[in-house]
Amino acid sequence: MRVHSILFVVVAAVAVGCTPKKIPGTELDDTDDTRAILDVMEKYRLALEKRDAQAIVSLADESFKDDGGSANPDDDYNYQDLFTKLPETLKKLGDVRLEFNVRKIELSEDTSSARATFTYTQSYSMPGLQAKKQSDTEIKQMIFKKVDKNVWKIVSGV
C-alpha cells in the first residue's frame, strides 16, 4: 500500500510539473506568443479608444480582410480600407470605451497564425447622429499572423 501511495505522489508531481504555466487571472498558457498576442490586442484597444486609425493600421498585416461581422459588404474592410474608411468611421465616434476578456488563444501547429476568442464590451457615442450612448457586448474572434519572431499582426477581427 505504501508503494502505491509513493507512486501516486510521484506521478501527481510529474503531472503538475508538465502543466503549462497560466497567465495570472486567466486560463491562457503563459508563452511568449500568447503574451505578444495579448499585447497587440491591448494596443488595438488603446488605439480604438483614442480613435487613432494610424495606430490600428500599424497593428494590421497587409493581408488584412474583415467582413465587419455581417453579410453587408458596406462594413467590410481590407488593408487599404484601413487607410481610407477607418479614419472616417472613427471621426464619427465620440467617447469610446472597450474592454476585452480573452477566453482562448489557439496557435496553429507551426505557430505562424493564431485565433483569439474573446468577449468585448464597447460603449461609444456618436455626436450629431444619436444623442444616446451606444453599447455592444459580443463574443468575437481576432485572427493573427506571425510576421517575425514574436511580432504578430492582425489579419481579421477588428
Image (cartoon, rainbow, N blue to C red):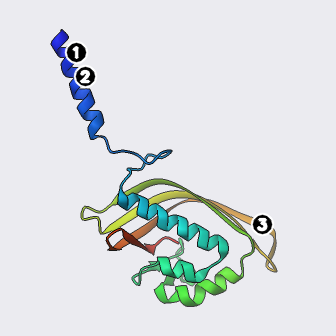
Quote the CA–CA distance across marks 2 and 1: 6 Å
Residue 11, compared with residue 76, is above or below; it is above
Label 3 packing within 10 angstroms: few (<14), some (14-19), many (20+)? few
Outermost residue on the left side: it is 3
- Which of labels 1 and 3 is toward the front? 1
Residue 146, compared with residue 109, is above or below; it is below
To which quarter of the image does residue 95 belong?
bottom right
Does the CB distance between marks 2 and 1 fall below 8 Å? yes
Q: Position of residue 39 (x, y in %)?
A: 48, 64
Label 2 packing within 10 angstroms: few (<14), some (14-19), many (20+)? few
Q: Quick one: 140 or 47, which is closer to the camera?
A: 47
Amino acid type assigned to the residue bearing label 1 in the image:
Ser
Quote the CA–CA distance across marks 1 and 3: 61 Å
Residue under the image location 48 percent in, 76 percent down: 59
Residue under pointer 1:
5
Say whether disc 1 or disc 3 marks the residue closer to the N-terminus: 1
Amino acid type assigned to the residue bearing label 2 in the image:
Val
Residue under pointer 2:
9
Q: Is residue 33 left or right of residue 135?
A: left
Which element type, helix, strand or loop, lies under badge 2? Answer: helix
Which element type, helix, strand or loop, lies under badge 1? Answer: helix
Residue under the image location 65 percent in, 82 percent down: 89
Q: Position of residue 2 (x, y in %)?
A: 19, 10
Q: Quick one: 101 or 23, which is closer to the camera?
A: 23
Residue under pointer 3:
133
To which quarter of the image does residue 74 belong?
bottom right
Does the CB distance between marks 1 and 3 fall below 8 Å? no
Numbered tag placed on residue 157 in the rendering: none
Residue 10, compared with residue 25, is above or below; it is above
Residue under the image location 66 percent in, 74 percent down: 50
Q: Is residue 112 left or right of residue 44?
A: left
Residue under the image location 22 percent in, 21 percent down: 8
